[in-house]
Amino acid sequence: MSDQIRPPDLLFGRWTGPVARGNERGKPMFGLNVDIGVDLGTANVLVYIKGRGIALQEPSVVAINKENNKIIAVGSEARRMLGRTPGNIVATRPLRDGVIADYEVTEKMLRYFINKSGGRRLFFRPRIMVCIPSGVTGVEERAVRQAALQAGAKSAYVIEEPLAAALGAGLDISEPSGTMVVDIGGGTTDVAVLSLGGIVCSRSIRVAGDKIDEAIVRFVRREFNLAIGERTGEEIKIEVGTAYPNGTEEKEIEIKGRDLVSGLPRAVTINRRQVHEATKETLEAVVSAVKEVLERTPPELSADIVNKGIVMTGGGALLHGMDRLLSEETRVPVHVADDPLSCVARGTGRALGMISFLKETKPRGGAPSRL
């Protein structure tokens, strides 16, 4: 979808007419200003810089010294510390279930990532667009915007994840035709039907990649009397996890942890079917959300979805057999977007190029500016 496509009234309010090339609002002055799109995810943070593409992709983990409350490490370095820190250091995720759980740490993390990606210039602050789950409350939405402003943004905007995912996947949602997007992230799964540039119906559930990891950890604890960490649970999901075990190659992985009976280190082997059994209930919640949105979709848009299929984005789209499971349960073709991990970030950056088409907003006061 080109940035020059005329946005429909449903998404952007009144039409403001073509943008004058030499006087475009928000155009970088002397090439010093910069527009930044941020996918502020529960598991990973991606930073998109206009003209450069994805400039940074790091885990949303922060390591803090509890004695003086100072940040020791952020991102990949902090993730390596998960479950391996001494008593005075804690490695934590400041975002849970798609929303901010620790405001101060999130703001510092966001500032660090913006500076690291080169998005902050001397004397010139960037415009930042941050994606949010479609089901967040007004308070949660305002917290995201304020965190972006505190992190150094000149102005902060928010966009719903399904809309950003569709833009990042290159879908043309400006036409009066139904498009369905399923974005499975780390903290939330967002399902939406889009038409004329807006969300017709949607559902956001706080069941996604993290819940799958937790389900695996619980299963190993229950079946093998073995305690493992969330990092190990994620590794199991990536290596042998599957949403559709029928007819797939059998795989297994050796995992190590602490025996709950003896307290000593122990190794066990877990296979693909056992992992599917562990995650089956969590995956059913995702399928139920997709079916619920399909049931509420107007008939004409349903016909469009049958023709075009469902588009999957987010890290959860990479889970083995997830597309086959959704296709079998809904009887609708399912397609995985190119580079699903970065779809939301790329869509957020693309939306920044369309701010000129928005009606007049006040991103610093009142309600957050929301696309």
Image: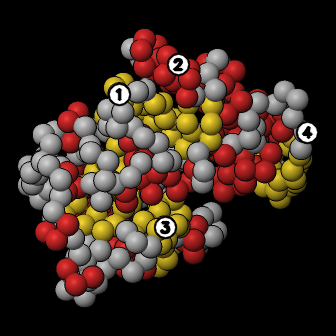
How packed is label 3: few (under 14 Cα within 10 Å), some, or many (20 or more)? some
Cα distance, mark 2 to mark 4? 29 Å
How packed is label 2: few (under 14 Cα within 10 Å), some, or many (20 or more)? some
Cα distance, mark 1 to mark 4? 44 Å
Q: Nearer the viewer, residue 212 or 343?
A: 343
Kind of residue at disc 1: Pro
Cα distance, mark 2 to mark 1? 22 Å
Callout 1: SS: loop
Kind of residue at disc 2: Lys
Which residue position is annotated with label 3? 54
Return the x and y of residue 328 as percentages of the image width and height. 69, 21
Which residue position is annotated with label 1? 176
User: Of callouts 3 and 2, which one flags the residue occurring earlier in the amino acid sequence?
Assistant: 3
Callout 4: SS: loop
Asked if disc 4 and disc 3 are in contact, CB closer than 8 Å, the reply is no
How packed is label 4: few (under 14 Cα within 10 Å), some, or many (20 or more)? few
Callout 3: SS: strand
The quarter holding residue 65 reads bottom left
